[in-house]
Image (spheres, helix red, strand yellow):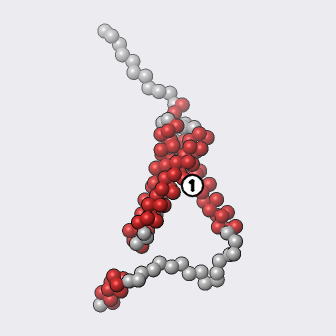
Amino acid sequence: EQWDDAVKRAQAGPVALMVVQRNGVPATMTKQLLFEFISNIVAAFIAALVIANVAGSYFMRIMVVMMLGIFAWMTVDVSHWIWYAFPVDYMFAQGIDHLTGWFLAGLLIACVVKSKRANAPQAVAVTTDA
């Protein structure tokens, strides 16, 4: 019976998702910007590790980095849309942000990080005419 009441209240609305900071938040964003920068550097390092092991052209390695951004979007923002009813416009805006952001990051990362496998010896087919 409690479950049925909860379902009825959720369907009737309003519904909200809130984050409450009991002790307030800093007036400046210095700490948040620093942590965001560090988390982005760590994410870029992970992308660099991945493409270092991808045999492919510069363009292909950019696409791999971009796909990592799409992977992040799918696992976080799309899930927020599914489970918490985030607005569709927000979800797609986040997708564009991830797509373009990681594409631009891929341009630099793929330029700096060379593929280890791209320099590996290539197999050569040898045929003999008898």
Amino acid type, callout 1: Ala
Residue 129: percent from left, percent from top: 33, 10
Q: Residue furthest bottom?
A: 1
Q: Is residue 78 left or right of residue 113?
A: left
Residue 49: percent from left, percent from top: 55, 47
Residue 75 lies, with reference to residue 54, above or below; the image says below
Residue 75 in view here: no
Residue found 44% across the figure and 26% down from its top: 123
Q: Secondary structure at mark 1?
A: helix
Residue 130: percent from left, percent from top: 31, 9
Residue 120 lies, with reference to residue 62, above or below; the image says above
| Displayed quadrant of residue 1 | bottom left
Residue found 50% across the figure and 41% down from its top: 61
Q: Is residue 29 left or right of residue 17?
A: right
Residue found 40% across the figure and 72% down from its top: 85
Residue 96 in view here: yes
Residue found 54% across the figure and 53% down from its top: 101
How many neighbours does mark 1 have within 10 angstroms: few (below 14), some (14-19), or many (20 or more)?
some
Residue 102: percent from left, percent from top: 53, 51
Q: Which residue is mark 1?
A: 43
Residue 14 lies, with reference to residue 65, above or below; the image says below
